[in-house]
Image (cartoon, rainbow, N blue to C red):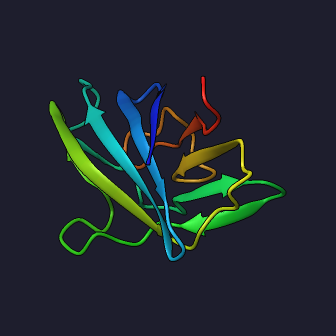
Amino acid sequence: MIDTNAQGTNEAGVTARVKSVTISDDATVLGVVLSFDSRATNYVELADADTYLSYGDNQRLHLRQIADNPYLRISNGQSLTGELVFPGAIPVDTKEISLVFNDGNEGSDTSAPGLVVTVPLAAQ
């Protein structure tokens, strides 16, 4: 497990914090805290469009949908704390990954805002 302290925010009011990355033969798992605070809407969905890990030369591992929250819906004033699972392993020499939520959407979208969090994997 790699401890990280990566964080990203967007105009819609989402804060995404990646606290850890675990790389195994079968999956890459991110320990995250996802929060939403805004007066613009009651909730957002962080996996309404493509949500994935990006690394290397345009390589992607797509998010495995969570059974009871497949669109990663977060209500205003709430946080989700847990693990996001991306089936597949990233190469051990990868220096950084990007966690992409709602690829192609603007960060100001009040329904499914886009957000990219760059996560360094090398020791700081």
Q: Position of residue 42 (x, y in %)?
A: 19, 39
Instruction: Classify residue 92 as left or right of residue 84.
Output: right
Q: How many marks?
A: 0
What residue do we see at 41% from left, 42% from top?
Answer: 20
Q: Quadrant of residue 38?
A: top left
Give the residue displayed 63% in from the left and 51% down from the top. Answer: 104
Q: Give the quarter of the figure containing the C terminus.
A: top right
Residue 103 is left or right of residue 34, and the answer is right
Q: Quadrant of residue 67?
A: bottom left
Q: Position of residue 9 (x, y in %)?
A: 46, 26
With 97 as the anchor, is 16 left or right in this view? left
Q: Position of residue 62 (x, y in %)?
A: 54, 68
Residue at figure coordinates x 42%, y 61% from the top left: 48
Q: Residue at x 33, y 63 (%)?
A: 71
Residue 10 horizontal/vertical position (percent): 47, 28
Residue 53 versus residue 99 in the image, above or below? below
Q: Nearer the viewer, residue 52 or 96?
A: 96
